[in-house]
Image (spheres, rainbow, N blue to C red):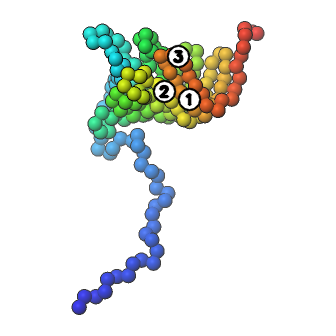
Amino acid sequence: MLPPPPAPPATAPETDAAAPAADPLAPAEDALVMTGINLYMHRARQAEGVARKPEFWIHAETFSMAGEDRYLFENARAVVYDDQDAESMVIESRRGQFEQEKRAVLEEGVVVRAGTMTLNLSSVVWERPEEGAPGGARSDGPVSVDDPKFKLEARGLRLYPDSKAFELDNVTGFITFGKDAS
């Protein structure tokens, strides 16, 4: 006759609640890390045989592959071109990820420069929403906007480079109207 099975423990096994969650933007321990990469997203309806600038171009100092068509990068500078191939904005960040022809996430120390405006954010996502539609940027975190004519704080942002428009959520700040008194 076999002995009876052991009794279950009186309490549930302890979990390490203090252990941090896995960082989705951290490269795998065995990842091949390379330097100096240029990644592009082109407009969906680019005319064949006509040289055009990409809609979104990013240069990163270091990068690693994180799966098929997905790259993790550090120390990046991205340029967004409008529908006339003019440089619409420049985005800098310490790290992020790029999914080929879908989206780019830029995080940590994100600074966006567009004309005379400087925006400071914790993160920004560049996406192409649907086939044929122009890309746009969004952030659902705190945003600081600095310009010679206004200073604003907001809780969210949407940028539309082709129309040179942006939307802010829950905005506070000041705007200078008319000519400068100085």
Choose between 74 and 84: the one closer to the eye.
Answer: 84
Choose between 162 and 59: the one closer to the eye.
Answer: 162
Residue drawn at point x = 41 percent, y = 22 percent: 133
> Does residue 74 appear in this view?
no
Residue drawn at point x = 42 percent, y = 45 percent: 23
Q: Would you say 154 lies left or right of 70 here?
A: right
Q: Decide: few, some or many residues near mark 2? Use Cα within 10 Å; few <14, some 14-19, many ≥20.
A: some
Q: Decide: few, some or many residues near mark 3? Use Cα within 10 Å; few <14, some 14-19, many ≥20.
A: few
Sequence-wise first label, 1 or 2: 2
Q: Which amino acid does label 2 sit on?
A: Ala
Q: What residue type is labelled 1?
A: Leu
Residue drawn at point x = 30 percent, y = 36 percent: 65
**As displayed, is residue 132 above or below residue 27?**
above
Image label count: 3
Sequence-wise first label, 3 or 2: 2
Q: Which amino acid does label 3 sit on?
A: Lys
Q: Look at the numbered discs 1 and 2 and tell me whether their residues touch, using CB distance below 8 Å.
A: yes
Q: Quadrant of the C terminus?
A: top right
Q: Which residue lies furthest to the right in this view?
A: 181
Per the model, the C-alpha gap separating discs 3 and 2 is 12 Å
Question: On the image, numbered disc 2 is attached to which residue?
Answer: 137
Per the model, the C-alpha gap separating discs 3 and 1 is 13 Å
Secondary structure of the residue carrying numbered label 2: strand
Question: On the image, numbered disc 3 is attached to which residue?
Answer: 164
Q: Residue 34 in the image: state x and y as whole percent.
A: 30, 32
Question: On the image, numbered disc 1 is attached to which residue?
Answer: 157
Per the model, the C-alpha gap separating discs 1 and 2 is 8 Å
Residue 31 - label? none
Q: Quadrant of the N terminus?
A: bottom left
Q: Residue 54 in the image: state x and y as whole percent.
A: 37, 17
Q: Look at the numbered discs 3 and 2 and tell me whether their residues touch, using CB distance below 8 Å.
A: no
> Does residue 9 appear in this view?
yes
